[in-house]
Image: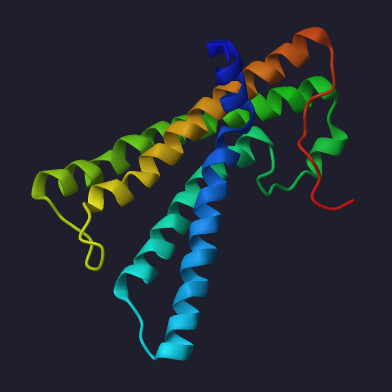
Amino acid sequence: MQLKKIIKEIDKNGERYLLLPLYTMIVVTISMEVVRRSLLSYSSIWAEEVARYAFIYVAWIGSSLAIKERAHIRIDLILSYLSNRNRILLFIFGDIFTIILAVLAFYWSMESVITSIHYGSVTHGLRISQAFFLAAVPLGFAMMVVRLVQSIQRDWNDLKAGRPVFEGNKLFD
């Protein structure tokens, strides 16, 4: 496969490739722990930690996917009263504002990762560096910024071409 094809595939489905193994890990770990508790009257501390930290990664990676698909919850009553041009401009304004917040949050969330690395903190059950799990937050915000920039580019191109704005896929019709 060419590098361009690989990059295109990662851009198209990257979050899904990350989410599937994490979801699987959560389901398998929790199922295994339920069986262990029910049949063996035994539970482990590491299983709860694995599921919890995988879920944290799922939430942050899912936020990036939701931005890409424009699937975040929003009240779009006002959008129906706006022209396509004004809708696009409103989406671009919202994305720019979100980028500012995401960059600030990325900056501040890196502080906890750096502190964890500096002091060598580890998780209680797994005895793995806490920084690995704390990195989910800045990673999520970094991925969100990339998707927001792509969203602004898509909206700007739609505005210039006179195409209708991409409003995302509806959850319910």
Task: Give the x, y percent position of residue 10.
Answer: 57, 27
Q: Residue furthest left?
A: 119
x, y (%) of residue 3? 53, 12
At a point 57% along the width and 11% down the height, the residue shown is 2
Q: Quadrant of the N terminus?
A: top right
Q: Is residue 168 above or below residue 2?
A: below
53 left or right of 167 in image: left
- Picture quarter containing residue 124? bottom left
Q: Look at the image and name its color scheme.
A: rainbow
- Along the viewing direction, whichever of 15 and 97 lies nearer the viewer: 15
Taking the image as shown, residue 39 lies to the left or right of residue 44, namely right
Pick out the residue farthest to the top.
160
Count of numbered marks = 0
Q: Is residue 154 left or right of residue 116?
A: right
Residue in view at x 41 percent, y 89 percent: 40
Horizontal side, residue 166 vs residue 106: left or right: right
- Kindly give the residue lying farthest to the right in the view shown: 173
Image: 139 above or below 154: below
Residue drawn at x 49%, y 29% is 145
Nearest the eye: 8 or 110: 8
Q: Position of residue 5 (x, y in %)?
A: 61, 15
**Residue at the image point whose x is 51% and y is 34% from the top:** 144
Indicate whether 48 appears above or below 97. below
Q: Position of residue 136 (x, y in %)?
A: 38, 46
